[in-house]
Image (cartoon, grey):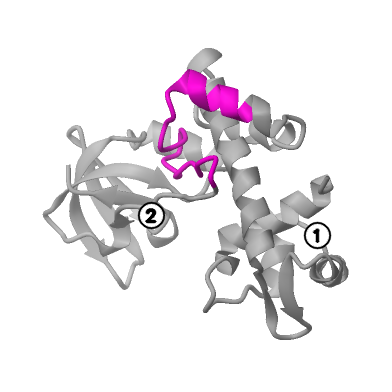
Amino acid sequence: MPSLTTENYVKAIYQLGGHISTEVVATGAIAQQLTVSPGSVSAMLKTLRDAELVEYAPYEGVRLTQSGKKLALRVLRRHRLIELFLAHTLKLSWDEVHEEAEHMEHAVSDRLVDRIDDYLGHPQTDPHGDPIPKSDGTVEAAMGKALTEWPVGAAFRLVRVLEQSSEFLRFLTESGLNLSAVGQVVEHAPFAATTTVEVEGRTTVLSEQVAEKLIVITP
């Protein structure tokens, strides 16, 4: 059975793009994602390579093998279904469920996760709009574009948030940008690196760093 550390690493590599055959993930990006030293990452990547979960060469980056991708999707399936279960049954807010699921995802069995999936009616997305992998290891392609790419004057609906820290999500809630919120792009200001939106009659100026983490579609 894979260790907690192994599961955290393959999940992080997947989320950083290491499941795409043409992409490699830098050691530094993994270190930042997991808040560990680059040296620790290099040592762990060698272990994952020996377990045939990744393809890794020092100074060149890392990508997941098919076995690594399969494991990463299992962990993500557990995490995202647990988040939705906590939101649905205990009414935890979207800024509370991520941290709880981080702890629980390693402790529950795939059998229990499948029961949760049945109970929730086989949902497609979690409370942050992330697609939930299916039990067969497949995952739906994500919809939408970053808010930074949305045309000025065009209406949008928020369908996914790419950062799930509590502080970030609370900021979005305070700004009226909950999941499924409908609004309109008022202005992109490249030199100021900001995007201005109007949601329910309220105008909010977002930094480019925030706006690029908001995925939207046509209402």
* Image coordinates for residue 103, horizontal then vertical, percent: 73, 34
Q: Is residue 18 above or below residue 6?
A: below
Q: Is residue 150 above or below residue 94?
A: below
Location of the N terminus by quadrant is: top right
Q: CA distance from mark 1 to mark 2?
A: 30 Å
Q: Nearer the viewer, residue 204 or 216?
A: 216
Location of the C terminus by quadrant is: top left
Q: Residue furthest front?
A: 136
**Magenta highlight: main SS:** loop
Type of the residue with mark 1: Val
Q: Which residue is mark 2?
A: 141
* Image coordinates for residue 195, horizontal then vertical, percent: 29, 57
Density class for disc 1 (Cα within 10 Å; few <14, some 14-19, many ≥20) is few
Left or right of residue 85: residue 145: left
Q: Which residue is painted at 42% across and 23% down in the image?
A: 121
Residue 33 in view in this figure: no
Of labels 1 and 2, the one closer to you: 2
Q: Which mark is residue 101?
A: none
Q: Which residue is painted at 36% across and 34% down in the image?
A: 178
What span is colored magenta in the figure?
113-136
* Image coordinates for residue 18, horizontal then vertical, percent: 60, 68
Q: Residue furthest top?
A: 90
Q: Which residue is mark 1?
A: 36
